[in-house]
Image (spheres, rainbow, N blue to C red):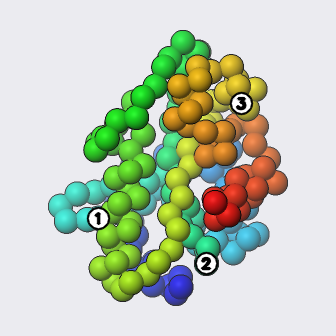
Amino acid sequence: MKLSLLNSLFKKKSTLLQTPNSILIKKLKELSLKNNFLIFVNTNIYHNSNIYHTKLILINSTGIYVFETKEWTFKELRNAAAQKAYQQEYSSKTLSFDNVQEILKRKLQSIREIKVGIFNYLIREYLSTDEYSHLNASLQDLLPNQKIIFCDSNENEILKKLSGATNT
């Protein structure tokens, strides 16, 4: 796969409000530099007349890793239950992985028959691994541990989760 070709898929809009880098975003950036990933932070993906904002995208020869962030705390999630919604639009209260993943697939196919894995992750700045273990089972089923980067995740755990995506 030609990684330089992928640079043209992701355009940055100069007027986009940039959110400051969190500890986890900084950790992911450092990890990316050490492991030869292309990094796209606060990037818009343009498709037809729609714009899909992504917090972080990492790309290497094994795949495209799309990260979404939610600032939900353990207190907000403690008594919550969840269910999968289809064709969900982006919102601060929902996850919209399906939309971004489908748009990326279409973009890659429109360039050429590029077959590459697209993997989704959730960055949880305010949720630890231990707190996650105390959440409702419906949340854990919908958001499996291996797809979440927790506030207490270290570099080895993150790499293990990223490499685990390509092994399944």
Q: Amino acid at mark 2?
A: Ser
Between 138 and 30, the one nearer to me in the picture: 138
x and y percentages locating residue 68 in the rendered image: 50, 47
User: For numbered disc 1, what is the local secondary structure?
Assistant: strand
**Label 1 to label 2: alpha-carbon separation:** 23 Å
x and y percentages locating residue 139 in the rendered image: 54, 27
Q: Amino acid at mark 3?
A: Ser
Q: Is residue 29 visible?
A: no
**Label 2 to label 3: alpha-carbon separation:** 30 Å
Between 154 and 105, the one nearer to me in the picture: 105
x and y percentages locating residue 112 in the rendered image: 36, 86
Image disc number at residue 46? 1
The quadrant holding residue 87 is top left
Of the numbered discs 2 and 3, the one sitting upstream in the chain is 2
Rendered position, 45 above or below 90: below
Image disc number at residue 128? 3
* Residue on which the image places disc 2: 61
Between 124 and 120, the one nearer to me in the picture: 120
**Label 1 to label 3: alpha-carbon separation:** 33 Å
The quadrant holding residue 38 is bottom right
Rendered position, 152 above or below 76: below
Rendered position, 35 above or below 14: below
Q: Residue at x 61, y 78 (%)?
A: 61
Q: Residue at x 61, y 73 (%)?
A: 62
Q: Is residue 4 visible?
A: yes
Of the numbered discs 1 and 2, the one sitting upstream in the chain is 1
Task: Residue lying at the far top in this picture: please name it.
Answer: 79
Q: Amino acid at mark 1?
A: Tyr
x and y percentages locating residue 28 in the rendered image: 67, 56
